[in-house]
Image (cartoon, coloured by chain):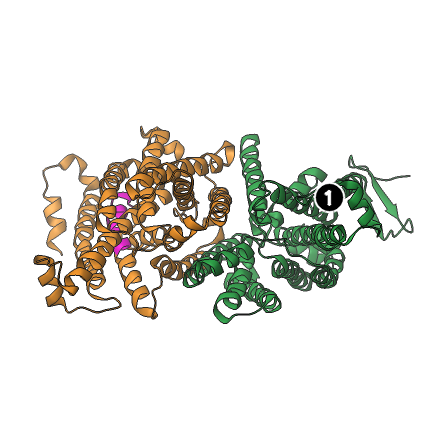
Chain colours: A orange, B green
Amino acid sequence: MPSQPTASVSAPNTSLSGADPRASAASNSSRRRWIGLIPLALLCLAALASSMLVGSRSLPPADVVHVLLHPDPADAISQTVWLSRVPRTVLVLVAGAALGVAGALMQAVTRNPMTDPGILGVNAGASLAVVVGLAFFGMTDISQYMWWSFAGAMITSVLVFMIGNTGSARGNPVRMTLSGVALGAVLSGFSSAVLLSNSEVLQKMRGWSAGTTASQPLDATLAIVPFIVAGLILAMLSSRSLDLLSLGEASAVAMGAHPNRIRIVALVAIALLAGGATAAAGPIGFLGLLAPHIARMIVGPHQGWILAYSVLIAPTVMGFADVLGRVITAGEVPVGVVTAFIGAPVLIYMVRRFRVSEV
Amino acid sequence: MTELDFGRRIHRIGPHSRPFLLVDGLSARLCTALWVGIVLLAVFAVFSGSAQISPAEALSALVGQGDDYTNMVVLEWRAPRILMAVLLGACLAMSGAIFQNLTGNPLGSPDVIGFQTGSYTGALIVMLLIGGGSVETMIAALIGGIVTAFLVFLLSSKQGSVRGVRLIIVGIGVSAMLASVNVWILLTATVEDAIMASLWGAGNLSGVSWSTFAAAFVGSAVFIVAAIALSRPMRLLQIGTPFATALGQNVRAVQVSAIVVGIGLTALATATVGPISFIALAAPQIARRLVRSDGLALGPTAAVGALLLLLADVVAQRIHPDSPLPVGIVTVSIGGLYFLWLLLREGKKR
């Protein structure tokens, strides 16, 4: 687009003429980023559509559209669509977006590219809280144990952050990963202690603990939507300050940011997002690792754009992973297993590609 | 005597010019204390338990004069279990020390980098998908652990060199992948089978008999001897590959044999009693701090590991007398919390 730079140069702001080429480049790339959202959105729609259509029983698109517009409780196709496909698709969208953004936030706050809510033990914390709620406090409904999941995610992320970030080793990614892995192991150890002594809860939790979209009715998913929306808004609002934080603690302070305030806001957002997604879909790993990395490859180091792209990329990946899990075997492979099989090789590829000092 | 004194007393055994054994005074005293602790704990474990047997009866069984019931409880159930805990605790701890030394990172322990998850996958495939007895399960767990270990090493080596942090992250990835496979296999089974398999997967010392102990003892003896033989070259390796090479060491051979011994020790322990995590991670770290040395201290490490596993098993059996916990859950709780505390304290100090 050759006309774009000339338009910028003719802008009235002459005092900044030295910065003009850069400004124009910025607006140019900003426009490219806006345009880049379109194919991603289409891809995401394709994933959601295939989640509606494909399954143990494939439905013709015309029928699906028909029953979506005219629900009919007596019709078998309508039953399938409204009781199975719609809840799953909504959950893919909600949980996917939440996990993708939670991962992006986590990578930004810890300044560690190898992080996501699964690796840092936040999913394990949310799971433990849910297990405890189910086993000892007689909870049955997601609107009850949802709060436990939020609390578990919050406490775990604060703990990991505190342990991994004390003293002069502050911000050391390996230390942070270390404490996350250790805390995650302890918390899942507690979970299995509860589950092994309580076969009733084990039965209830079994499907959920693999990370699945199949277990929740629609209204359960809708119950977490407000919290996830709140988390997404918090994330978007904090994107600028996270950009500052990425320059390093000292530079961020020099530029007028309050690193600890930023971190607290981000932690609240992470807890809302990861806790909500885990309550509804169970612990799903690697989505939060994968999505921000793909986003960063496309848009570069710009938090706002990384978050925006992650919102679209993560549900796309999760949607296709879910569909793949439905058709790959006669039974069904839970989506958490499929994402682990997609995500772990990516992690391994990344760690092989980057220099070890960057890890 | 013109001996250098670095603030620690070193005892030399053998000819003065070329001693074949150097014994660190602190480390020797520490080992003695730890083994005394292990023996005391073992005595406590033999003489107490959920079965109503008085110490006097237990003593009579030990000297061969008990009735059938006491004999069975004390000699057939308690004794092999205690010995197994000590043996496998030492094995896991030594394996952890070897890997932490090789990777130069406490996270490089076999339980973090997925070998035990691989063993569990192998065992699950036999237990739930193919169907097989305890011997087949053991073999499958052994194979699963070894295959996973080689996979992790293969994926993390680049131009023939394996770097610590890369190995750990690759291990975490592989282990997460296998863990999700495990969850999935468990999902396809009935609840009863799943609980049985999860009990194995949590690491369980109950059901240990003299025959399994004998098998584990014979198997691990080879690796333990090899580990002791490797401890001196590995200490040399710790000062850096270039120096070790310059001093005439065959670095590659030492590394490869250390890896084989380390994998062997873990795979053997896991195949026998299921994945018991955190002993391999925590014991070398605890031992290092007790001995106040930065190097490989195999003797104290093994003693710490044995004490930890025995202690965890004693706790696991008594915390809930009606439904005893798998020992792996106790080790992960105690070891994990200790490790977190360690991280926290180190962060504050520096």
Magenta segment main secondary structure: helix
Residue B337 lies in magenta, yes or no? no
Q: Using the image as rendered, state which of residue B240 and residue B82 is in the foreground.
A: B82
Residue B230 position in % (x across, y down): 73, 57
* Residue to which mark 1 is pinned: B53
Vertical placement of residue B253 versus B47, above or below: below
Residue A104 in view, yes or no: no
Q: Residue at x 32, y 33 (%)?
A: A265
Q: How many marks?
A: 1
Q: Dot 1, crowdedness within 10 Å: few (<14), some or many (≥20)?
A: some
Vertical placement of residue A137 versus A358, above or below: above
Q: What element carries label 1?
A: loop
Vertical placement of residue B331 versus B150, above or below: above
Q: Residue at x 73, y 55 (%)?
A: B76
The region drawn magenta spans A302-315
Three-letter amino acid code at disc 1? Ile
